[in-house]
Amino acid sequence: MNLERPFKPRWMLAALAGICSLAGAPKAVADDSISMALNRPSVITPHAGFDLITSIARAGARLVAVGEHGHILLSDDNGASWRQVETPTSVTLTHVTFANATQGWAIGQMGVVLHSSDAGQDWSEQLNGMTANAITLAAARADISAHGSNDTTAANLQNAEALAGGGPSVPFLDLLALTPSHLLLVGGFGLAMASTDGGMHWASIADQLANPQGLHLYGMALSGNTLFIAGEQGLILAGPLSGPYNTDTTPFSGTYFGMLAPAGGPLAAYGLQGTIITSTDQGQHWQTPATGLPAGIDAGLALANGRLLFGDVAGNLLESRDWARSLQPLPNAGEPVAALAQAADGSVIVGGPFGLRRLPANEFSGN
């Protein structure tokens, strides 16, 4: 693991808000700092809806948005108004997802995983970086004991030891809820975990990933029965749900920040330098549509009408009606886009460093 390479936040706005404060190697954090950051509840403030928003999800008809300082906001009127709810942590949250209308998870810095069973009203901690590092290290040591030391097991152990030595400083960046019980979790420096009981217990799956360098893992998508994991340095891993996940060759060597696997459409990954790649054959071949964007694409969304929507850090919003083969710009306020979600009424909610915005449904109602 190259502990000195920079860690770039998924939405590439570290200079503006610092979603993931990792400039290089995981650094040890004092116990009192851990306690303060992880265990200090978020502060209820009228400004929460105007601060950095990193991710938005649907819980039935409800919208749930997360961001810095542990902020979680809910909307029950399709994003017209928002209210903040209490959370048990004040670390920046990086992603939120729901398996159904009630069961959801929010993840973030210092390896925190929060769970809600009531559509986002109440949240409790299920995992933090201290426990995640301990699980990862124990699994790597057990793998050495069971299979001996080889290039793969030795690299996994080295990565796990580096993570443990750095304390709970590494963020989780994506959580995929396959069912309310089966969860997959990835993050910085190759962190990868799974739960089969809704997050009550977690196991490391780092040994299932062909990622000996411990590259950062930013996003996941399930296409058919194949799981795809996107990361830095052009890394895309693919394999059956049970693993292992092997390297998939792609035409881009930069960082991928996320993936989409819309029903009936091609697989898509997006990232730095305005890059989008698509595949219609489960990753066997990839195409690279020209986006004309110089800035990193941080957010992607499959709309209910079959279109795709992408937003970049320069404030561009692009729509595609042909599965990303071509893209058309949409009116936007010029604010960086870090998160996209579609409300029950068809309107689109945009999140970024300046909070939440609602775009009217008639902009996205065509076929």
Image: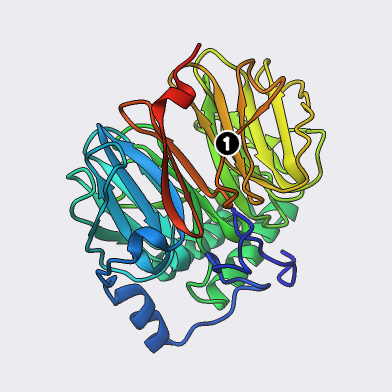
Which image quadrant: the N terminus? Answer: bottom right
Position of 71 compared to 317: left or right?
left
Q: Is residue 195 visible?
A: no
Residue sitting at x 35%, y 82% = 36
User: Colour mode?
Assistant: rainbow
Position of 228 compared to 198: left or right?
right
Residue 61's x, y, as percent?
25, 32
Q: Amino acid at mark 1?
A: Pro
Residue nearest the observer in this picture, 26 or 277: 277
Q: Is residue 171 visible?
A: yes
Residue nearest the observer in this picture, 31 or 313: 313
Check the image and report above or below for 67 versus 5: above
Position of 345 compared to 163: left or right?
left
Q: Quadrant of residue 287?
A: top right
Residue under label 1, please give it.
Answer: 331
Query: How many numbered tags mark residues here?
Result: 1
Residue 320's x, y, as percent?
62, 23
Check the image and report above or below for 291 versus 324: below
Residue sitting at x 60%, y 17% = 321
Residue 280's x, y, as percent?
67, 16
Residue 66's x, y, as percent?
38, 54
Q: Residues within 10 Å of mark 1 (few under 14, many from 20)?
A: few
Q: Secondary structure at mark 1?
A: loop
Residue sitting at x 32%, y 35% = 99
Residue sitting at x 66%, y 61% = 8
